[in-house]
Image: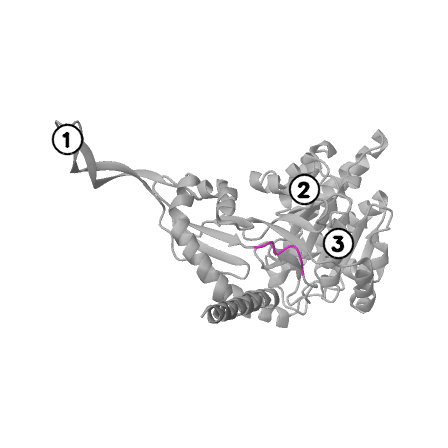
Amino acid sequence: MRDDLLLRLLDVFVVLAVAVAGLWAWRRWHYRSFWLVVGYPLMAISIRTTWRKVALGCGLTTKRHRWWFTLVPNAVASTGMVKVRRRFQRIAVDTKPWMWLPRPTRYGWRVTVHLLEGQIPDDYAQTAERLAHSWRVHAVRVSSPRPGRAVLAATMRDPLVRVDKIPPSSELLKVTVGRLETGKPWEIDFRTVPHWLNAGATQSGKSNLANALIVGLAPQPVALVGFDLKGGVEFTPYAPRLSALATSRTECVGLLDDLVALMADRMGLCRQAGARNIWQLPPGVRPVPVVVLVDELAELYLMADKSEKDEIAKTSTALLRVAQLGRAFGIYLFCCGQRIGSDLGPGVTALRAQCSGRICHRVNDPETATMTLGDLDPAALVSARAIPAETPGVAIVAAQDGQWYRARSFYVSEHAAEHAARMYADLTPPWEEITSGTQGAEITEADLTELIDA
């Protein structure tokens, strides 16, 4: 009898060991199906059963009066014992917000919560870190799709630990450069967000992001223009795919003058056709889009002596004019810099106001983070200053949906960017043809007819 019991226990132990090993292998090799079949149901039950305690601990409950039966003292018996009786009366109770059933996502789950009276989504955003620790998840982000509702999106693990290779671009002027913390692709779409400001210290991933842009834009029918204030050491290897490259402040002034004149020519072309921008022109006469890559933005504004004051003022005015008017005429800016501060002058502050796309990698001084993200969301500023040095490529991004996210760019080596520049060198439109107006010929009657029909 005892031997039979030991054999049965051994069989149970073997079955449990095999089941645990199978679950571990399932989770290790195909986490997505494991999460949907095993992890999500257990998580949903845990979230719903602990929501009252979590909401109470995070200060998300409110006091409401309810009618309830309570035990109240009545009299003292002769034996000295206190008699109690049930009484129906109003008492104050902690009421939790109503929560729907959590829905699984690729890296976690999301759930909709009904806000209580007097609550706003920011109340939940301020307790996001508390919620993450209470539910033992990596992070919780809060959004509000409509009044009276808050969506809590939790990620079980950090999706930015490992990123894939950069995929090919599918649309004009749109490049997938990395991944957001939600697991969605990080896209830079110049048609939606025309001008971008990219700040980051050395070895933070700022140059890698520029490499990813070059690899993504190289096969597209666009003109790339470079401003490299490091003497050309950053963008010169990509010269086969650049229509123009300026490596000194004097050359930058001349190239900016060309861009301002180009805007004036395209302005006249749109006015002649009755179009508000070049995208309303027929494809046959539509000018080629121009993407301007600026490296070391601060060098355009630094002044060694008073003799450079006029040159800096002219450069600042021309660059600001391109940022203000360039979108309608197919000229887009992507400005990079290690340091972007108010001490560089009012021109930088005015340029920042025109750059609705913001990217902040790890920076050395808090003012650069403040200049890049401070006017958007204070929480984004805190997250930007918390980026560790051992995670290059991680940045805080102000996305086109009006929210900010942690993101990480794909690793693109200089060799890969140089290879893309050489491979698609035949797609490079000469700068002389772009500025001479040959890209936008006179509009004929057929073109006008096509424009009206469109």
Which residue matches tag 1?
74
Residue occupying image coordinates x 66% and y 50%: 195
Residue 160 image point, x, y percent:
64, 55
Q: Is residue 334 visible?
A: yes
Q: Is residue 289 above or below residue 337?
A: below
Q: Is residue 430 visible?
A: no
Which residue matches tag 3?
208
**Secondary structure mainly formed by the magenta segment:** loop
Which kind of residue does numbered mark 3 sit on? Asn
Nearest to N terminus: mark 3 or mark 2: 3
- Label 1 to label 2: alpha-carbon separation: 76 Å
Residue 200 image point, x, y percent:
72, 44
Task: Give 270 or 93, whichever is nearer the viewer.
Answer: 93
Which kind of residue does numbered mark 1 sit on? Asn
Nearest to N terminus: mark 1 or mark 3: 1
- Label 3 to label 2: alpha-carbon separation: 23 Å
Residue occupying image coordinates x 74% and y 34%: 344
Q: Is residue 248 above or below residue 306?
A: below
Q: Quadrant of the C terminus?
A: bottom right
The mark closer to the camera, 1 or 2, is 1
Task: Give 372 or 281, whichever is nearer the viewer.
Answer: 372
Pointer 3 local density, CA inside 10 Å: few below 14, some 14–19, many at least 20: many
Left or right: residue 430 compared with residue 168: right
Magenta-colored span: 157-163
Which residue matches tag 2?
351
Pointer 2 local density, CA inside 10 Å: few below 14, some 14–19, many at least 20: many
Left or right: residue 115 compared with residue 165: left
Residue 61 image point, x, y percent:
37, 41
Left or right: residue 151 compared with residue 359: left
Q: How is the image coloured?
A: one colour
Residue 207 image point, x, y percent:
76, 51
Mark 1 lies on a secondary structure that is strand
